[in-house]
Image (tube, rainbow, N blue to C red):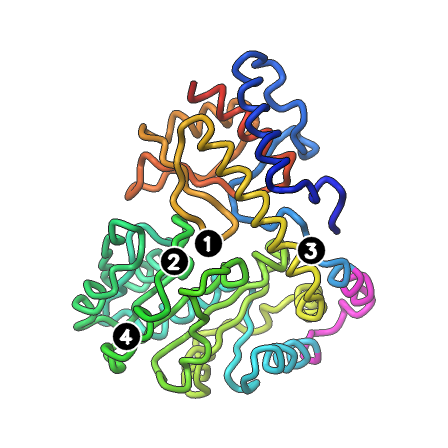
């Protein structure tokens, strides 16, 4: 639920953060005095969660469903599948639900790699698919991002010979960068079904650039395409685990062969369906993220640190030094940020939290790096 703490203007927040960072250098003991803390006294901005929290409609739906928790959620599975089909303008036979989009990534990897078929992915990107591929005995080919942090689709296409799956996270995690829609379209056309393409759109709802489009409408043209979506990010249901795949019906059936039985959670299903109907919560989440992200970037720039342009709800800060000591120093101040990414060892991933959390981060960060 939105509170007055989230309605500070971008300019006012930037001024406040700039002053806060300067003050932190003079008053180290006050580094986290205004931060929003958990019961353990921590600021957790490490997992790209939505600081606004779930829709009130989702919370109400879960309360109402508790009394039905003794039943398997077959009715709720169908209801959410139909709601998603209507929301996306596609057929219900093109949607497969799972306990988080990680499950979609696992199913796609199992269905498309192994037996000498390689996984092709960017470096760095979300690593789950690499773990699934290695578990199935599949080789993994990593292609570095371009100098401006796009997927290098030309090199990924060149590596496609003998591959079973090509994974594209757009916007990309951990860089929050975008691969333009024209490049995605050209890549899919060039590939011509030589491999399955899995496009992970976990951060789809945060993107506002005209250079971006969802790949879901392209499924009609490309039977080898799978799009993964999640309710963990903009809908703030990360703790419940609900995601889904969108693909042609024959691809959905191929994925279904590898799915475990009865892994879907009643509360996650009803919360997800209620969240779909709360467009206002999505827009509030987008606005909070946009304004707080912009103010945080301004605060970082005020002390000389640049970020990769972000199209998601997190930032990659160029530290110009090894990130591990900074991560550990922040942890010592109860501020938890992203892990070390070997392909970008001098960058720090920071989730965009609440205004108070970002004030706390910037104050602690100012102490650590100055």
Mark positioned earlier in the residue sequence (3 or 2): 3
The numbered mark at residue 54 is 3
Disc 2 residue crowd, few under 14, some 14–19, many 20+, Cα 10 Å: many
Which residues fall within the magenta stretch? 60-75
Query: Residues under labels 1 and 2: Cα distance?
Result: 7 Å
Mark 3 and mark 1 lie on one chain; the one further toward the N terminus is: 3
Gap in angstroms between the C-alphas marked 4 and 2: 15 Å
Q: Which mark is residue 178?
A: 2
How far apart marks 4 and 1 lie (CA) works out to 21 Å
Q: Nearer the viewer, mark 3 or mark 2?
A: 2
Residue 65 shows in this picture:
yes
- Disc ID at residue 186: 4
Q: Nearer the viewer, mark 4 or mark 3?
A: 4
Q: Whole-percent x and y of residue 368?
A: 46, 21
Q: Does the magenta stretch mainly form a helix, a strand or a loop?
A: helix
Of callouts 1 and 2, the N-terminal one:
2
Could you tell me which secondary element the residue under label 4 belongs to? helix
* Quarter residue 79 falls in: bottom right
Residue 116 point in image, percent of width and height: 20, 70
Res 369 quadrant in image = top left
Please give the residue where the numbered disc 1 appears in the rendered image.
311
Depth check, front residue: 49 or 310: 310
Name the front one of labels 3 and 1.
1
* Residue 116 appears in view: no
Q: Is residue 181 above or below residue 313?
A: below
C-alpha gap between disc 3 and disc 2:
26 Å
Secondary structure, mark 3, is: loop
Residue 282: percent from the left, percent from the top? 64, 61
Q: Is residue 31 above or below residue 172?
A: above
Image quadrant where residue 107 sits: bottom left
Which residue is at a point 39% across and 61% down the rendered structure image?
169
Density class for disc 4 (Cα within 10 Å; few <14, some 14-19, many ≥20) is few
């Amino acid at each position: 639920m939105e509170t007055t703490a989230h309605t500070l203007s971008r300019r006012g927040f930037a001024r406040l953060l700039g002053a806060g960072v300067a003050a932190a250098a003079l008053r180290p003991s006050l580094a986290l005095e205004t931060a929003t803390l958990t019961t353990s006294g921590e600021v957790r901005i490490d997992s790209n969660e939505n600081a606004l929290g779930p829709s009130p409609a989702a919370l109400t739906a879960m309360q109402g469903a508790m009394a039905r928790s003794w039943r398997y959620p077959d009715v709720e599975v169908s209801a959410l599948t139909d709601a998603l089909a209507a929301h996306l303008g596609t057929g219900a036979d093109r949607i497969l639900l799972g306990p988080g989009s990680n499950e979609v990534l696992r199913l796609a990897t199992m269905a498309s790699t192994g037996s000498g078929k390689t996984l092709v992915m960017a470096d760095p990107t979300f690593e789950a698919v690499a773990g699934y591929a290695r578990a199935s005995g599949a080789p993994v080919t990593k292609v570095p991002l371009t100098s401006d942090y796009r997927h290098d689709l030309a090199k990924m296409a060149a590596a496609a010979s003998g591959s079973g799956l090509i994974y594209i996270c757009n916007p990309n995690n951990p860089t929050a960068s975008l691969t333009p829609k024209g490049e995605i379209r050209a890549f899919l056309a060039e590939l011509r079904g030589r491999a399955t393409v899995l496009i992970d759109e976990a951060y789809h709802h945060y993107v506002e650039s005209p250079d971006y489009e969802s790949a879901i409408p392209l499924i009609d043209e490309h039977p080898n395409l799978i799009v993964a979506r999640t309710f963990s990010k903009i809908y703030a249901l990360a703790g419940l685990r609900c995601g889904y795949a969108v693909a042609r019906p024959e691809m959905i059936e191929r994925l279904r062969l590898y799915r475990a039985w009865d892994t879907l959670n009643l509360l996650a299903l009803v919360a997800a369906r209620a969240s779909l109907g709360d467009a206002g919560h999505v827009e509030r989440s987008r606005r909070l993220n946009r304004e707080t992200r912009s103010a945080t970037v301004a605060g970082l720039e005020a002390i000389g640190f640049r970020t990769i342009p972000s199209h998601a709800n997190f930032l990659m800060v160029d530290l110009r030094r090894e990130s591990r000591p900074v991560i550990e120093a922040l942890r010592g101040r109860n501020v938890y940020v992203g892990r070390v990414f070997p392909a970008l060892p001098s960058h720090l991933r920071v989730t965009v939290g609440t205004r108070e959390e970002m004030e706390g981060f910037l104050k602690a960060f100012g102490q650590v790096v100055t």
